[in-house]
Image: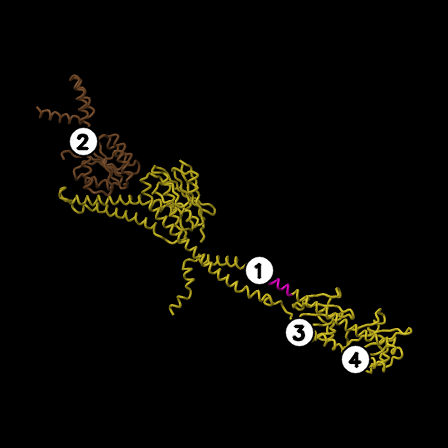
């Protein structure tokens, strides 16, 4: 069990040890960047093809519906024309001129039904609109006056010799439509009218709907269903679809209570009817259908693969960064040791002095105890010498402590510090003796209000030591002055170190921040000090500037943000 | 040692200066202390020091400058450098400038005493050789000059260099023995 709990998140544990929040941030940023770079183009392509597919599918559906509408309208036109021709044949037959009796009508009806079983009945009308003869299932309709009916009025005034009515219930309360033809005989007009059962046409149309892919319906000019499948409406009900009368055929998309309905229509030539074909599979466009499903199947593994690769790459990048940081830290430490090395001579000498005092006092005490040099001195008289020894030991300890405190590897730690205090620790602590015996005067021109910034004091100290070491070396053993200035700007603080040393040429200035470049004698400088200082100051969000004139001296200026952010 | 060796010690570290002076006084040296270069040069002005122990790194005038001045002003003064900042380069430099020896702090007393003894002998020898040269000069003059001129010459030399007197004494002693 214990094994398991550690196995739980070894990756994260290793990648982000506590206190390394910035690596986590770096990881997230890298991951986001990689995912964006890899996936964005892919997503664009997917979306493009998705819409392309959608458009193609819509287009093909449009074509499909239009084709059906056109074809079926032709068929219907043909059907109606045939029915009109049937009636015309009868009205123009010689028998019709002889008599317009109900018997003849019965014969006619028989003929018609033989041709098409959609015919229900047939009647003959006088010029005034009275049905003078009738054959069919409703004999009571004989002698009825239809003079004021719309169809009758229309037919009389129409140029065409026929009319096909809309479907209506009429006297018989059954949906039907009629075809009437007219003929003039000796200045008298006769009208032959047959009633047709739309159910028959509907049966025919339903056979076209076949596998239920499309719905067909017929509406009149005001949008009432003339023929309709029960899936979308009932007969004579007002359809939500009213196709435009111009152009005579086309496709339309209407928004019906938030649902997009797409249909193709064709106005018939024979009647004021429009054939409407709409797709049975309506509803919102399905992104995961057809080609898009295929697209999704292909791209999903790709997206997953890329995402995985991005995760992998991001953690590798973070690992590399960490490695680089480690190397940088090692380099900084090495350079720190090197700058201490440059100090070493001075420090060894500084220790030599108290050691010499100790040696001297010890020897003197021995001498004073030695009978050879007369009466032995009483022990209390030796106490001042012993005190001096103790003081000298403490002096040695101070020196080694300062040195160790500087060399000790510490983690980067940003905290509020006072810049002047940090500088003083270097000047008055590590370098004091070296400066005194070299007759170098330190001139501190600090800003009136101490500079308080948030930065890493250890690193700042390292940089200051480097700059001061360089300033001392630039004086080449001659007495001189090193001026340390601190100033506060609006957003940044400036710390400058100016020496009165040998100065540098333009060419030298160009190279001083390169690693292993040194102007010092062989064995004196490592060439790491400034390059590492530069790295440190960059890392703290600042800059180093140099000004130098050959033979006059150099000024190095550290510029740091007044508030260093993590 | 019949005569006390007159020694000037120069060091800015006062406690060290006091102790080493004390120890060498116990060993019969006639010690004068100076805690800076200028003090040392002033103390040496009257002459009479046989040897000087000189620190190198001091605030103000440094050891090398002091060494140069002392050697220029006092022909037979032997200077021994005793420094905490010893280095090969500075040792070579000081030797070129005429230092008799170069010791680093902390030192061994036996070694220091040995060096002081050698330096004193060298000083005596140099002085003796220098006096011999003068005698040779006088002899050369006396070979051709009348006694009166010779006496004037010797007087002149003696005024210049009082030590010549002791050499003359020695010479007279030798002369007596020969007779």
The disc numbered 1 marks a residue on which chain? A
User: Which residues lie in the magenta part?
Assistant: A49-57
Are both tags, 3 and 2, on one chain? no
Between circles 4 and 3, the one closer to the viewer is: 4
Tally of numbered discs: 4
Please say if the residues under marks 3 and 2 sit with CB atoms less than 8 Å apart: no
Between circles 3 and 2, the one closer to the viewer is: 3
Q: Answer above or below: position of A390 versus B79.
A: below
**Chain A appears in which tint?**
yellow
What colour-coding does the image apply?
A: by chain
Q: Which numbered disc covers residue A114? A: 4
Are both tags, 4 and 2, on one chain? no
Figure quadrant of residue A370 = top left
Helix or strand or loop: what does disc 2 sit on? Answer: helix
- Closer to us: A378 or B32: B32
Helix or strand or loop: what does disc 3 sit on? Answer: loop
The residue under label 1 is A45
The residue under label 2 is B125
Q: Main secondary structure of the magenta part?
A: helix
Mark 4 and mark 3: Cα distance apart in space: 31 Å
Figure quadrant of residue A65 = bottom right
Helix or strand or loop: what does disc 4 sit on? Answer: helix
- Closer to us: A447 or B65: B65
Please tell me whether residue A377 belongs to the stretch shown in magenta: no
Chain drawn brown in the picture: B
x and y, in percent, of residue A188 in the image? 90, 74
**How dense is the environment of label 2, judged by Cα within 10 Å: few (below 14), some, or many (20 and up)?**
few
Helix or strand or loop: what does disc 1 sit on? Answer: helix
The residue under label 3 is A212
**How dense is the environment of label 1, judged by Cα within 10 Å: few (below 14), some, or many (20 and up)?**
few
Mark 4 and mark 1 lie on one chain; the one further toward the N terminus is 1
């Amino acid at each position: 069990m214990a094994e398991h709990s550690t196995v739980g998140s070894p990756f994260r544990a290793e990648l982000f040890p506590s206190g390394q929040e910035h690596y986590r941030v770096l990881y997230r940023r890298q991951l986001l960047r990689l995912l964006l770079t890899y996936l964005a183009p892919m997503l664009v392509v997917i979306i493009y093809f998705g819409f392309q597919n959608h458009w193609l599918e819509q287009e093909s559906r449009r074509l499909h519906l239009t084709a059906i509408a056109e074809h079926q309208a032709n068929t219907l036109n043909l059907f109606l024309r045939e029915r009109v021709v049937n009636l015309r044949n009868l009205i123009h037959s010689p028998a019709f001129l002889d008599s317009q009796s109900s018997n003849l009508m019965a014969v006619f009806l028989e003929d018609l039904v033989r041709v098409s079983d959609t015919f229900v009945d047939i009647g003959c009308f006088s010029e005034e609109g009275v049905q003078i003869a009738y054959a069919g299932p409703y004999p009571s309709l004989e002698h009825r006056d239809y003079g004021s009916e719309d169809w009758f009025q229309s037919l009389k005034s129409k140029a065409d010799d026929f009319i096909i009515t809309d479907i209506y219930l009429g006297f018989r309360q059954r949906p039907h439509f009629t075809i009437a033809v007219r003929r003039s005989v000796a200045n008298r007009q006769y009208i032959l009218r047959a009633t047709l059962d739309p159910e028959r046409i509907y049966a025919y149309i339903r056979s076209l709907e076949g596998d239920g892919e499309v719905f067909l319906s017929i509406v009149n000019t005001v949008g009432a269903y003339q023929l309709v499948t029960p899936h979308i409406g009932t007969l004579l009900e007002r359809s939500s679809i009213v196709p435009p009368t111009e152009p005579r055929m086309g496709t339309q998309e209407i928004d019906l209570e938030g649902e997009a309905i797409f249909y193709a229509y064709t106005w018939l030539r024979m009647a004021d009817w429009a054939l409407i074909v709409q797709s049975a599979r309506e509803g919102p466009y399905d992104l995961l259908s057809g080609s898009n499903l295929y697209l999704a199947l292909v791209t999903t593994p790709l997206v997953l693969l890329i995402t995985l690769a991005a995760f992998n790459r991001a953690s590798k990048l973070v690992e590399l960064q960490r490695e680089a940081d480690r190397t940088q830290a090692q380099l900084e430490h090495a350079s720190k040791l090197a700058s201490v090395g440059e100090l070493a001579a001075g420090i060894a000498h500084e220790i030599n002095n108290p050691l010499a005092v100790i040696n001297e006092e010890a020897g003197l005490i021995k001498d004073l105890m030695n009978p050879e040099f007369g009466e032995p001195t009483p022990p209390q008289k030796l106490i001042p010498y012993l005190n001096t020894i103790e003081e000298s030991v403490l002096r040695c300890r101070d020196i080694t402590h300062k040195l160790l405190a500087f060399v000790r590897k510490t983690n980067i730690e940003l905290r509020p510090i006072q810049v002047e205090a940090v500088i003083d620790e270097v000047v008055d602590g590590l370098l004091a003796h070296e400066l005194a015996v070299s007759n170098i005067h330190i001139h501190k021109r600090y800003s009136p209000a101490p500079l308080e910034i948030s930065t890493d004091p250890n690193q700042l100290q390292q940089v200051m030591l480097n700059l001061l070491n360089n300033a001392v070396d630039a004086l080449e053993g001659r007495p001189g002055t090193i001026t340390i200035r601190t100033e506060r700007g609006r957003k940044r603080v400036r710390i400058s170190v100016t020496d009165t040393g040998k100065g540098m040429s333009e060419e030298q200035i160009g190279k001083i921040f390169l690693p292993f470049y040194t102007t010092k004698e062989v064995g004196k400088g490592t060439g790491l000090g400034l390059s590492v200082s530069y790295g440190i100051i960059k890392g703290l969000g600042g800059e180093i500037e140099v000004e130098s004139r050959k033979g006059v001296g150099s000024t190095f200026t550290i510029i740091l943000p007044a508030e260093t952010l993590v | 040692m019949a005569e006390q060796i007159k020694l000037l010690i120069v060091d800015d570290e006062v406690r060290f200066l006091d102790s080493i002076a004390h120890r060498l006084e116990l060993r019969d040296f006639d010690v004068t202390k100076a805690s800076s270069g200028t003090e040392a040069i002033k103390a040496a002005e009257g002459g009479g020091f046989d040897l000087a122990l000189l620190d190198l790194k001091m605030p103000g005038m440094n050891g090398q400058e002091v060494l140069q001045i002392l050697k220029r002003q006092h022909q037979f003064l032997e200077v021994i450098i005793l420094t905490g900042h010893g280095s090969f380069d500075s040792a070579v430099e000081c030797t070129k400038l005429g230092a008799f020896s170069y010791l680093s702090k902390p030192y061994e007393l036996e070694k220091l005493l040995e060096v002081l003894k050698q330096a004193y002998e060298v000083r005596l020898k140099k002085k003796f050789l220098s006096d011999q040269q003068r005698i040779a000069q006088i002899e050369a003059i006396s070979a051709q000059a009348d006694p009166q001129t010779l006496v004037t010459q010797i007087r002149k030399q003696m005024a210049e260099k009082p030590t010549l007197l002791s050499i003359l004494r020695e010479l007279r002693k030798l002369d007596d023995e020969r007779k």
